[in-house]
Image (cartoon, grey):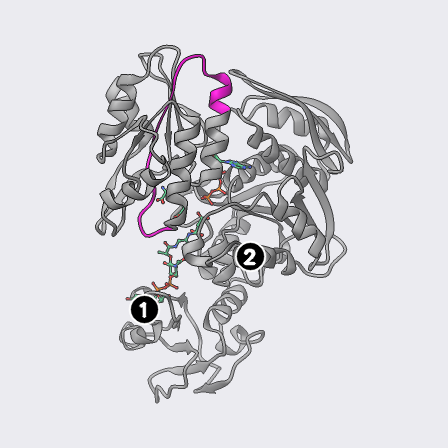
Amino acid sequence: MKLTQLLENVTTLDVKGSTEVEVGGLAYDSREVKLGWLFVAVAGHQVDGTEFITQALSNGAAVVVSENDLDLGAGAVHVQVPRARRALAEIANAYYGDLSRRMTVVGVTGTNGKTTTTYMIRDLLRDGGFLPGLIGTVAYEIGERSIPASRTTPEAPDLHAMFRQMKEAGCDAAVMEVSSHAIAQQRVHGIDFNISVFTNLTHDHLDYHKDMDSYFNVKAELFQMMERRHDRSAVINIDDPWGRKMLEDRKFDAEVVTYGFSQEAMVSASNAKVNVKGTNFNVSTPWGKARIHMQLLGRFNIHNTLAALAVGGLCGIDLQRMIRTLEAVASIPGRLELVANRKHKRVFVDYAHTDDALKNVLSTLREICKGKLYVVFGCGGNRDRGKRSKMGRMASELADYSIITSDNPRNEEPGAIVSEIIEGFAGQDRFEVVLDRREAIEKGLQKTGRKDILLIAGKGHETYQEANGTIVPFDDRETVREIIG
Ligand SMILES: CC(=O)N[C@H]1[C@@H](OP(=O)(O)OP(=O)(O)OC[C@H]2O[C@@H](n3ccc(=O)[nH]c3=O)[C@H](O)[C@@H]2O)O[C@H](CO)[C@@H](O)[C@@H]1O[C@H](C)C(=O)N[C@@H](C)C(=O)N[C@H](CCC(=O)O)C(=O)O
Ligand SMILES: Nc1ncnc2c1ncn2[C@@H]1O[C@H](COP(=O)(O)OP(=O)(O)OP(=O)(O)O)[C@@H](O)[C@H]1O
Ligand SMILES: N[C@H](CCC[C@H](N)C(=O)O)C(=O)O
């Protein structure tokens, strides 16, 4: 594609060189650049992408896009833009053919519940006659292909390349998790979302967003992005105070469908009963009423179900069909996943890595636990430190005994992370520290008797442990199976 076509919707400050040049590919990482490609130099938090322009050129870049004014001479065209990340998204959209406009795109944002909700929506759309692709924390699904995910929401060129592959695989819809990092970094800028969903907002990622208001404002941008067209919808959880605020501020222009236990919610739940086998509740929607017998555990999964029902209803899928689909959902990878084992111990692996998630999961398990409730967990390194003691507090209040361990310490000292978690125990001493995660799981399994429950939290579907720049294979579920069969 010619550079001139790629720049059609991009605000440029200056262009040095011919825009008739053919562009053979896009890169935001100089190491990925190939002959004839366009490189966008992004000023990041770690390094300034402009430092890698020389490398991009030596790898064969034909075009360099950056915020600074440069003259690359005859070697390559230079495009100066006011915002490199925004330009990256606009160029990627043009390069891959603006395909989100030709698909039903559902974006799900919020601190917790995105993965579960997107899986449910994918199933509803599939059974409702769509062919949906999926993009999120666990996997990218393109037609029949499923690729393990590296990011919850990939960078714009990777996203648009996926839309292209989805189209080629016959997909007419895409369901995607939209992380706050992605919104802040313009990864989803220009995507034409038909439906956006807000699940909830609780403490996480404040290392990046600084405070809850800024975190909220970023999430709200997903809704403001929706184009002013009659068929755009916002699905909002009004049991969550930030969801209510989103509605009250109403800084977006789209049809609203609210959900929650609240009686005013348009898609609402009532009369919920949780037992070992699942969760039963009544739903009332603009498309009818029903009772649903869900296999998934927990009140929080009722919220996820309501969000999915709202999206399915907006897509015109019959309520009874939706109920059948949702009742068939047996588990979501790494989300309250029961790990079958020869010793018949009740062991759950869950991705709870915030205090709110830990609260929800531990309370759910407490409801079905006849003996003691054990938890093995840690907190990620180089991530929000503020949530560590809060997670500690939740574990101290809701579990009978905690084994505190490592969860991707990255470049931090594991013992230092644990010390911050322990602050939340505030003198309560029903815990021990076992830094090695495998040993911690082993310890947890030894303690867990027939009537007890062991929750292994924080890593869910993850298949690695990252420490000191090294990533080694590690899967909580596999580890349980290795230890007790
Ligand atoms: C905080 C964050 O989101 N950082 C992302 C961001 O980094 P950054 O802006 O600081 O970039 P940087 O590392 O300083 O590099 C600047 C630029 O130089 C480029 N570069 C760098 C080195 C080089 O040799 N050549 C080169 O061109 C980089 O590709 C980049 O474009 O842009 C980088 C390039 O795409 C991402 O790799 C990086 O993700 C980091 C690794 C990350 O861990 N992100 C997590 C927090 C994240 O995005 N998570 C959310 C989910 C969160 C959740 O809800 O749980 C997600 O959507 O996955
Ligand atoms: N609706 C919800 N409200 C609160 N907690 C939830 C909800 N749904 C799931 N959880 C808890 O939060 C954890 C993360 O859920 P899930 O993976 O669905 O969220 P996510 O938004 O995709 O997370 P991330 O952005 O970190 O990938 C789950 O393992 C569960 O413990
Ligand atoms: N995707 C999120 C959650 C990671 C959960 C936990 N396992 C960790 O590594 O901190 C993040 O990158 O912050």
Amino acid type, residue under disc 2 in the picture? Asp
Q: Ligand 1 within 8 A of label 1's CB? A: yes
Q: Is mark 2 on a helix, strand or loop?
A: helix
Horizontal and vertical percent position of residue 92: 49, 65
Q: Nearer the viewer, residue 154 or 202?
A: 202
- What whole-number distance in Å separates the C-alpha atoms at marks 2 and 1? 27 Å
374 shown above or below 248? above
The boundaries of the magenta stretch are 364-383
Horizontal and vertical percent position of residue 14: 48, 86
Verify whether residue 40 appears in magenta.
Answer: no
Residue found at x 47% / y 45%: 136
Horizontal and vertical percent position of residue 484: 26, 18
Q: Can residue 406 be seen in this view?
A: yes
324 shown above or below 148? above
Residue 213 shows which numbered tag? 2
Residue found at x 29% / y 20%: 445
Q: Which of 60 and 469 is in front in this view?
A: 469
Q: What element carries label 1?
A: loop
Label 1 environment density (alpha carbons within 10 Å; few <14, some 14–19, many ≥20): few
Verify whether residue 368 appears in magenta.
Answer: yes
Amino acid type, residue under disc 1 in the picture? Val
Q: Can residue 461 be seen in this view?
A: no
Residue found at x 72% / y 44%: 257
In the image, 286: left or right of 386? right
Pointer 1 residue: 47
Residue found at x 76% / y 38%: 264
Examine the image and state in which quarter residue 58 appears.
Answer: bottom left
Q: Which part of the image, by quadrant, shows the C terminus?
A: top left
